[in-house]
Image (spheres, grey):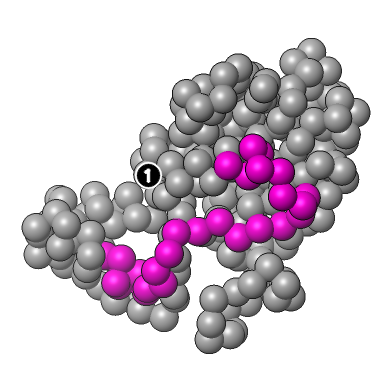
Amino acid sequence: MRFLVTGAAGQLGSTMVEHLATAAGSVIPLTRDALDITRDAEVLQAVRAARPDVIVNCSAYNHVDLAEEQTAEALNVNAFGVLALARAAREVSAILVHYSTDFVFDGEIDRPYLESDPAVPQSNYGRSKLLGEWFAADAPLHYVLRVESLFGGRPAKSSIDRILDAIRQGQPARVFTDRTVTPSYVVDVADATMKMIQSRPAPGLYHCVNSGPTTWVGVAEEAARLLSRQPKLVPV
């Protein structure tokens, strides 16, 4: 099976490339320098040249706060770039795997969200990701995996990685007390992606997180326990 991975230098993308190469064989890794998914013609040209069986889109604009000002950039990467990939996937009859986020929800319910729950994003970032989900469906064979608070892999730049750095350095770590999360370990996301491609469930939308909900305070406290450190947590 032949895979094309976009955003191959990122935290999820680099892990995906390594995992697919080990488990599945032929992988074409494309970093943003090699392929900017916001350029429709270049996307189509790259996909036509590669003729992949599966396109795994790990490209994303993930600056949640900056997206309030950089709306066009967020939309171009998270929405219209996905549309370009979906149309290219349709042309070569490839499966498209795309990753979305918990930010498509409003956080107003008191239980874990289901795929059937209505998406009501409260930010430009969340809106751009929801549009990306819709546009991914332009590829008949598509899987959209909603992940949350990715961690692990390299480069290590997630919220959990920043908390770990602060704890290791004895610095204060600002952590939310009022947000419940179920973070996604990138190695497990890559493994789930491969299993999904192999088992071929119905195309559509799936949630892909690890088990065990907690607050960000809980995450930080457990990280400190594993590091055998006394953390300086600043609840916010």
Where, quadrant-wise, is the C terminus in this rendering?
bottom left
From the top left corner, tell me how far across and down residue 53 is, in percent.
74, 26
Name above or below for residue 2 compared with residue 160. Answer: above
> Which residue lies most toward the top here?
49
Tell me: 203 left or right of 5.
Answer: right
As drawn, which residue projects farthest toward the right?
91
Q: Quadrant of residue 93?
A: top right
| Amino acid at circle 1 | Gly
Query: Secondary structure beneath disc 1?
Result: loop
Q: Is residue 9 above or below residue 168?
A: above
Image quadrant holding the N terminus, namely top right
**Location of residue 124 in the rendering, given as x and y in whole percent from the top left corner:** 68, 62
Q: Is residue 157 magenta?
A: no
Q: Position of residue 49 (x, y in %)?
A: 79, 13
Q: Is residue 76 left or right of residue 6?
A: right
Q: Is the residue marked by circle 1 packed among few (<14), some (14-19), or many (20+) residues within 10 Å?
A: some
Identity of the residue drawn at 47% across and 23% down: 22
Nearer the observer, 134 or 19:
19
Residue numbers of the magenta segment? 195-220
Residue at image mark 1: 152
Q: Is residue 196 magenta?
A: yes
Depth check, front residue: 209 or 30: 209
Residue 203 visible here: yes
The residue at 80%/31% (across/down) is 94
Instruction: Say which residue appears at 58% left-offset and 85% top-offset.
Output: 109
Q: Quadrant of residue 60?
A: top right
Position of residue 69 measured from the top left corner of the image (x, y, whole percent): 65, 57
Q: Residue at x 51, y 22 (%)?
A: 21
In the rendered image of this protein, does residue 10 appear above or below residue 177?
above
- Number of disc labels: 1
